[in-house]
Amino acid sequence: MRRTVALGLVIVLLAACARKEVKEYPPPPTLTCKRAIDAIKVDGALTEKSWQSAQPLELILREGTAKPKYPTTVRVVWDDKMLYVAFECVDPDIWTTKTRRDDKLWEEEVVEVFLDPTGTGDPYFEFEVNPANTVVDLRLMKSLKGMLRRGVMWDCKGLRTAVKVEGKIHSWDVGKDEKGRWTVEMGIPFESLDSLPNCPPKAGDSWKVNFYRVERPAALRNEDDEYSAWSPLYYAKSYHTLERFGTLIFSDQPVATK
C-alpha cells in the first residue's frame, strides 16, 4: 500500500515538473487592415497618402528576443482588387546575385509575405522579393510537404512588385554604406488567390499572415545573418511555421481613420 502511494506521488511530481517546463509564448499579433484612400501605383516610392497614413509594423528577430540591428517596417492596405504590402529595409550592404524568377531568393537578401486566407494552410501563399525586384511566388499545401517544385510552378497572375534602392545593388563582395536602404511595394490581386472565403474580402474577414525579412551581410562584413518577423516564431526556425502566423482583419474604414 505504501509503495503504491509513493509511486503515485512520484508520478504527480513528475507531471508537475513537466508542466513547469512547458514554456508559454505570447499569442500571435493582430492587424486591422484598412482601405486605401487613393489609387496606389506600385512603383516602390510609397508617396501615396494611403502609405503615409498606414500603421507601420516593426519586425523583430525571429526568436522574439530583441529588435534587429537593421530595422524593417511593414505597411498593409487594401482595395477591392488588391492587398498592398510595403517593406522599408535599412541595409548598409545591399546585394544580390539572383535575377531569375522563382530562383532561391531565400538564400540571399529578401523580404517575404505569407498569406493563409482560410487559416488551414490548404493552400497558403508565399511571395518573396529581393533588392533586384526578382520574384518568387508559391502556392503551397500544409498537408503536402515536400511539394516545393509544384508550388513554384504556380504564378500569381497580375502580381505587381517594385523596388526602390537608395544606394547601389552590389554582388557578394560589397563594402559598407550606413545610409543604404531599399523599399519593396507589392500588389497582390485577390482574384489570383483561389481559396478566398470572399473575393474581394468582406469587412470582418480574417486571414492568417506573416511578414519576414532575411538580412545577410556581404562577404567583407563580419556579422551574423538576421532573420526577422512580424509574428516571431520563438521555438521554430522555419518561416513556414503556420501556427505562429498573426491575424489580419479586413476593415471598411479608410486608412486615415485613427
Image: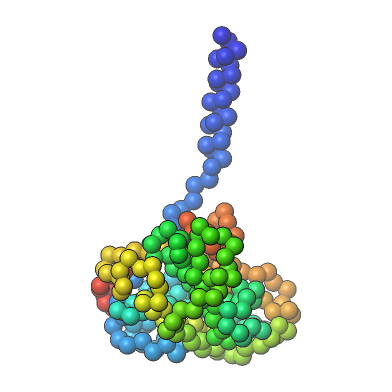
Quadrant in the picture for residue 7: top right
Q: For the point 66% across and 84% down, which residue is it?
A: 97
- The answer to whether 16 appears left or right of 104 in the picture is left
Quadrant holding the C terminus: bottom left
**Residue at 71% over, 83% down:** 172
Residue 253 lies left or right of residue 61; in this view the side is: left
Task: Please tell me whether residue 120 is drawn above or below residue 83 in the rendered image.
Answer: above
Depth check: give the residue in front, 80 or 31: 80
Q: What residue do we see at 45% from left, 90% from top? A: 43
In screen coordinates, is 70 left or right of 30?
right
* Farthest top residue in view: 1
Instruction: State the image coordinates of residue 206 (x, y, percent, origin top left).
Output: 34, 63
Q: Locate residue 66, reporting x and y percent.
A: 55, 62
| Image quarter hosting the N terminus | top right
Quadrant location of residue 92?
A: bottom right
Residue 180 at least partly seen? no
